[in-house]
Amino acid sequence: MLFKNDLEQCLTVLKNGGIILYPTDTVWGIGCDATNENAVAKIYALKNRIESKSMIILMAEESQILYYTSPQTNQVFDYLKGIHKPVTVIYPNAKNLAKNIINTDRTVGIRIAKDDFCKALITALGKPIVSTSANISGYPTPGLFSDIDVQIKNGVDYVVKYRQDDDQPASPSTIIKIKDDGNIEIIRP
């Protein structure tokens, strides 16, 4: 029941340009509709983060990647099949997203969500969602919900109740980048 109620509340907030605090397959994230420039700006303001520092977006399925980027190679999909931990891929040629979520070099970091709540939320919204760590820029990434600063909790439009009592600290995803020659560079192991 908690899962369903949180899902409904999140959808209402996201569709109205708001921001949420929610659990992901890595750390707790601050999120919004990744196609809504005003909502993305709210996250930058809450985190005191400069817009030139990119944020990750989550998608529910690999097939969505082609609508939001124009990858020059499919090699990354084969690479990801062999990895079982969450991996964020920096793709070139981002498109159909809020301008302030796309990096100045036209790249965007995308992770396919493995978490049931995230997948259900993204699927119901029909769009990717932003997933940036629930901390003020420059401060450590919180591993547990209880570690999240009250300024973040009070600064979002909705805080998901589902999984707040998780007691295993989480860690951020691995980040890789597709280079111009098609090779893969590991940014964060």
Image (cartoon, helix red, strand yellow):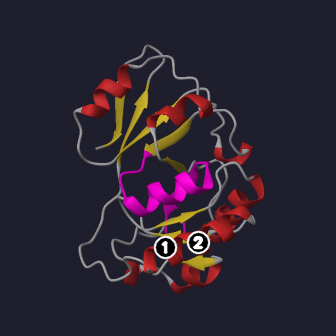
What is the quadrant of residue 137 in the picture? Answer: bottom right
What is the quadrant of residue 142 in the picture? Answer: bottom left
Residue at x 54%, y 36% (from the top left corner): 64
Label 2 with label 1: CB-CB less than 8 Å: yes
Separation of residues labelled 2 and 1 (CA atoms): 6 Å
Locate the C terminus by quadrant: top left
Q: Is 109 contained in the magenta span?
A: no
Residue under pointer 2: 8
Q: Eyeballing the image, is 105 above or below 6?
A: above
Residue at x 29%, y 28% (from the top left corner): 79
Question: Mark 1 packing: few (<14 Cα in 10 Å), some, or many (20+)?
Answer: few
Q: Where residue 130 appears, x then y in whole percent?
A: 57, 55
Q: Residue furthest top?
A: 181
Residue 4 disc label: 1
Question: Which portion, as a residue range, is magenta?
Answer: 112-137
Residue 38 left/right relative to 75: right
Q: Circle 2 — which element?
A: helix
* Amino acid under disc 1: Lys
Q: Eyeballing the image, is 50 above or below 160?
A: above
Residue at x 58%, y 23% (from the top left corner): 70
Question: Mark 2 packing: few (<14 Cα in 10 Å), some, or many (20+)?
Answer: few
Asked whether 118 or 37 is in front, the reply is 118
Q: Where residue 116 appears, x then y in whole percent?
A: 38, 59
Asked whether 53 or 97 is in front, the reply is 97
Q: Eyeballing the image, is 145 above or below 139?
A: below
